Amino acid sequence: MIKFLDLEKVNNRFRREIDERIKGILDKGWYLQGEENDRFAKNFADFCGAKYAVGVANGLDALRLIIKASGFGPGDEIIVPANTYIATILAISDNGCTPVLVEPDIRTYNINPDLIEAAITPKTKAIMLVHLYGQAVQMQKIWDLAKKYNLKVFEDAAQAHGAEYQGQRVGNLGDAAAFSFYPGKNLGCMGDGGAVVTNDEELYNKVKALANYGSDRKYHHIYKGLNSRLDEIQAAVLDVKLPHLQQDNQRRREIAKYYRENIKNPLIVLPQTYDEKAHVWHVFAVRTAERDRFQKYLSDNGVQTIIHYPTPPHKQPAYAEWNHLSFPVTEQIHREIISLPMSPVMTDEEVEQLVEVVNRYK
Ligand SMILES: *Cc1c(COP(=O)(O)O)cnc(C)c1O
């Protein structure tokens, strides 16, 4: 069987080093807000080419904290792609802000920059971008709009660690970025984890305090904060894995290139990229009209797949107030999309076998 993602194999490559680092933490008996967090935050900020990073409990919290630290709340609108994982939108609602959904470009699956201006109102405070499936959003039009209307630009980079736009890494393309280290992400820990990355010192200090009960020093609380911290064990695991991320992303690119050059089936629409470095292929999502039939065919032929995602946020019961709305491009993507196996530990044989199976589909 070709697994969608063999996480055990992904992490076993670093088993000895991870064991040692965890042993060090147990020996020391220091579990939160210690050296491991400081070291990883510095290394991850450097990796992104940004000044600051704060480890937090998960990707959703990273998003929530960025909005909270920016002081946005009820009455404020934030523009967000209709085609995203629901967490991006939940973070906006959770702060009492209004998510304003914008359709994606069917070629990139990312927000369609040409549709953003029409969604801007006097209440708009920010554009929340999502580098979906691992492909960096093409930023220039968005930067221009942000400047013209005085808007903040936030990145949901949960799927795109290491992706680049014109030589600049995600995490460094807006005012602040949220990362997730959920186990299956390109950089994943062994439980939940996330980070906020920014070049803004004030925002950095505020996120750091907000994530720690709103305190700037022990038992002194300047904000009504949360408890959202990355623990020392997860920080250590991430710090072991980070130096290998570029190589892992390179392997993903190699696999994606092979898929794109060798999958030749008129029933399958392959993903596109505007620049090899822009994409880190968190998922390799293809489209096909009869998606369920294709998924069953792959499963019958020993190939595991996942659908990212079967139901768009505006059709979810949690957003019943939007269920009547229509976003045809988003809905088409959710109807037709299916993700093929993609991970840095796939073998050449698996990759070749997968292409053969897909090409035989009729
Ligand atoms: C994974 C993910 C999140 C949420 O991250 P968690 O760590 O699971 O909370 C947010 N946005 C996107 C696009 C994601 O893929």
Image (cartoon, helix red, strand yellow):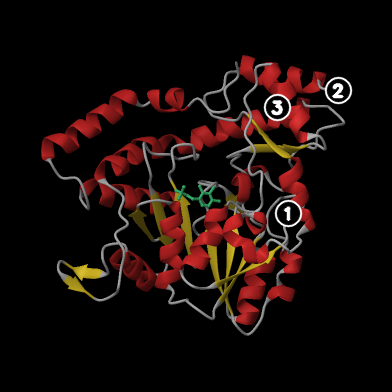
The answer to whether residue 174 of the structure is visible from this angle is no
Q: Residues within 10 Å of mark 1 (few under 14, many from 20)?
A: many
For image coordinates 17% across by 34% down, the residue present is: 24
Amino acid of disc 3: Tyr
> Disc 1 marks which residue?
330
**The label number, if any, that marks residue 362 in the structure image:** 2
For image coordinates 62% across by 34% down, the residue present is: 306
Which is more N-terminal, label 3 or label 2?
3
Which is more N-terminal, label 2 or label 1?
1
Amino acid of disc 1: Thr
| Residue 84 drawn above or below residue 259 | below
> Residue 62 sits in which quadrant?
bottom left
| Residue 258 drawn above or below residue 186 | above
- Is 164 displayed left or right of 140 in the figure? left
The answer to whether residue 214 of the structure is visible from this angle is yes
Q: Residues within 10 Å of mark 2 (few under 14, many from 20)?
A: few
Which dot, 3 or 1, sits closer to the camera? Answer: 1
Pinpoint residue 87: horizontal percent, then vertical percent. Answer: 52, 55
| Residue 220 drawn above or below residue 2 | below
Which is more N-terminal, label 1 or label 3?
3
Quadrant location of the N terminus in the rendered image: top right
For image coordinates 56% across by 34% down, the residue present is: 250
Q: Residue furthest left?
A: 28
- Is 323 displayed left or right of 9 in the figure? right
Q: Residues within 10 Å of mark 3 (few under 14, many from 20)?
A: some
Query: Given contact means CB atoms under 8 Å apart, are the residues at marks 2 and 3 in contact?
Result: no
> Disc 3 marks which residue?
258
Amino acid of disc 2: Lys
For image coordinates 41% across by 57% down, the residue present is: 61
